[in-house]
Image (cartoon, rainbow, N blue to C red):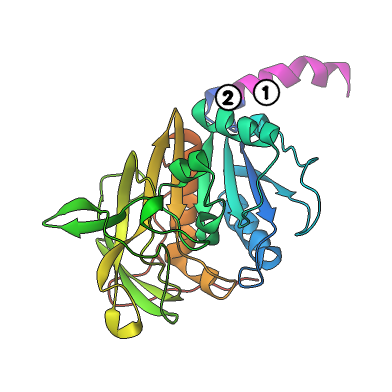
């Protein structure tokens, strides 16, 4: 660089900043994956999660993968402190090392964000703090001892502690999603209702449900082996200073093409990381009468 350019360079940067051209540092996001059963293929879903987050221009994403099933976890010690948000694409019941558990809980309590993606709510049924963080979960032996169902009566959320399994779903199909809290930053600007394309509709989830705020619901039709109840589909949890966003959508790559899933994932992750949402609602967001899909290329 010539002497004249060295002199001018700080001035150029100042002009850009004053003109509003300064670029904000990206949000550091970790996708933590691995160890899931064959029914949830993290090796194909993680690349899409990464693509969708980075396509917003807001995130720098690093993938951290746990040792394979059957291998020792004692050396699995991710550095959560380097990130603003952790996206969980992880389903296993073998405990993490105590040091890793403590580091994760400390990260969340101090304000780290968490996104619970689909089957991550199946993990760690016996880890009490994890279940407080995810709010509601399913499968792996969960039942009424795990906590209540969340039900919707008279415009209010109601906790139902009646006996029953935790976690189920009928055959994949399309279903209508309804906004429950349209004023929340994740939901603001989204339609009151929209069609979700073919996917698993998780129902009968149960857990501590503490500091839980439902954002959107869907009806699980008993004629399709569902619960016969409106079910929480998108919701948030507050744990310490940490913000948690859970989406039960996006079972596999084909289901992750749904624009409603993509956009709420992007918005929920920004909210978990920062407490706000700056993203605009795209023109191709689905409507109450029409599904919307994107290619995965």
Residue toward you, 272 or 282? 272
241 left or right of 256 in image: left
Residue toward you, 77 or 70? 70
Is residue 47 visible in the rendered structure shown here? yes
Query: x and y percent of residue 211 in the render?
Result: 33, 38
Judged from the image, the secondary structure of the residue bearing numbered disc 1 is: helix
Query: x and y percent of residue 90 in the render?
Result: 62, 55
Work out how far the residue at label 2 is from the one at label 1, CA to CA, in angstroms.
9 Å
Is residue 190 visible in the rendered structure shown here? no
Label at residue 247: none
Extreme residue in the right direction: 2
Q: Which residues are magenta?
A: 1-15
The residue shown at (67%, 54%) is 33
In this view, 234 is above or below 60: below
88 left or right of 169 in image: right
In this view, 38 is above or below 163: below
On whether residue 244 falls in the magenta region, the answer is no
Q: How many marks?
A: 2
Dot 1 corresponds to which residue?
12
Q: Could you tell me what secondary structure mostly forms the magenta stretch?
A: helix
Q: Residues within 10 Å of mark 2 (few under 14, many from 20)?
A: few
Using the rendered view, name the quadrant where residue 150 is placed: bottom left
The residue shown at (47%, 40%) is 272
In this view, 190 is above or below 30: below
Residue toward you, 225 or 230? 225
Judged from the image, the secondary structure of the residue bearing numbered disc 2 is: helix
Q: Quadrant of the C terminus?
A: bottom right
Residue toward you, 163 or 47? 163
Dot 2 corresponds to which residue?
17
The residue shown at (26%, 45%) is 183
């Amino acid at each position: 660089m010539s002497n004249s350019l060295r002199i001018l360079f700080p001035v150029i940067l100042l002009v850009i900043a004053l003109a509003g051209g300064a670029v904000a540092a990206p949000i550091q996001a970790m996708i933590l994956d691995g160890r899931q059963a064959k029914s949830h293929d993290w090796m194909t879903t993680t690349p899409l999660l990464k693509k969708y987050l980075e396509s917003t221009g807001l995130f720098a994403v690093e993938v951290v993968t746990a040792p394979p099933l059957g291998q020792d976890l004692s050396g699995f010690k991710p550095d959560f402190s380097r990130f603003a948000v952790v996206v969980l694409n992880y389903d296993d019941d073998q405990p993490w090392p105590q040091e890793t558990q403590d580091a994760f809980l400390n990260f969340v309590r101090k304000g780290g964000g968490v996104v619970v993606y689909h089957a991550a709510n199946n993990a760690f049924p016996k880890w009490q703090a994890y279940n407080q963080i995810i709010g509601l979960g399913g499968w792996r032996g969960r039942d009424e001892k795990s906590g209540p169902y969340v039900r919707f009566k008279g415009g209010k959320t109601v906790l139902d502690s009646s006996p029953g399994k935790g976690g189920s779903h009928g055959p994949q199909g399309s279903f209508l999603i309804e906004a429950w809290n349209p004023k929340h930053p994740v939901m603001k600007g989204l339609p009151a209702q929209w069609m979700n394309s073919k996917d698993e509709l998780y129902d009968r989830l149960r857990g501590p449900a503490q500091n839980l705020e439902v954002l959107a619901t869907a009806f699980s039709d008993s004629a399709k082996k569902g619960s016969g109840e409106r079910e929480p589909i998108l919701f948030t949890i507050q744990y310490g200073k940490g913000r948690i966003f859970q989406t039960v959508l996006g079972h596999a790559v084909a289901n992750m093409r749904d624009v409603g899933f993509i956009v709420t994932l992007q918005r929920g992750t920004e909210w978990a990381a920062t407490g706000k949402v700056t993203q605009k609602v795209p023109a191709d967001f689905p409507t109450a009468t029409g599904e919307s899909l994107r290619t995965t290329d």
